[in-house]
């Protein structure tokens, strides 16, 4: 929050992460790219091959570039699903209808 008045809480910035497996092992790592403080890439341990265990390690953690600062490890939101086949057909029909209506003005 901007104000440092009474009741204000300083929030740690959000660091989007991806889950990666360390090559040749079953160790999982949360990869922060880019770091909100130094714009570098950092790795945080996430467990041994268990997704449920890895998700428990999300949240506020000390930044790898400066242990005195915190950031929040958070998985970015999934993109919205595309509309269904019928929705796409309906949108095409409406667009075609609009084009036909506009052509009468010639």
Image (cartoon, grey):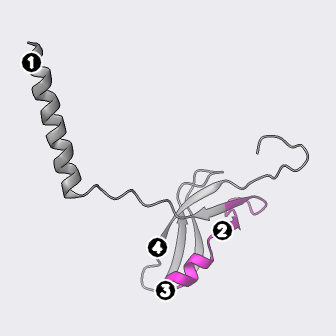
98 falls in the magenta region: no
Please tell me which of labels 4 and 3 falls first in the chain. Answer: 4
Residue at 48%, 86% (x, y): give it.
49
Q: Residues within 10 Å of mark 2 (few under 14, many from 20)?
A: some
* Label 3: element kind: loop
Q: Residues within 10 Å of mark 1 (few under 14, many from 20)?
A: few
Q: Which residues are magenta?
A: 47-71
Q: Position of residue 47 (x, y in %)?
A: 57, 83
What distance separates the C-alpha of mark 4 from that of mark 2? 17 Å
Please tell me which of labels 3 and 1 falls first in the chain. Answer: 3
Please tell me which of labels 4 and 2 falls first in the chain. Answer: 4
Q: Disc 2 designates what residue?
A: 59
Q: Disc 1 designates what residue?
A: 104
Residue at 57%, 76% (x, y): give it.
55
Q: Disc 4 designates what residue?
A: 20
In the displayed structure image, the side of residue 93 where residue 81 appears, left or right = right
């Amino acid at each position: 929050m901007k104000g440092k008045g009474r009741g204000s809480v300083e929030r740690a910035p959000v660091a989007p992460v991806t889950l990666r497996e360390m090559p040749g092992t079953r160790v999982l790592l949360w990869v922060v790219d880019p770091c909100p403080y130094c714009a570098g890439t950092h790795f945080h341990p996430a467990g041994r091959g268990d997704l449920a265990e890895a998700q428990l390690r999300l949240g506020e953690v000390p930044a790898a570039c400066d242990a005195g600062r915190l950031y929040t490890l958070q998985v970015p939101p999934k993109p919205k699903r595309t509309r269904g086949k019928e929705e796409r057909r309906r949108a095409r029909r409406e667009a075609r209808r609009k084009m036909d209506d506009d052509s009468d003005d010639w």
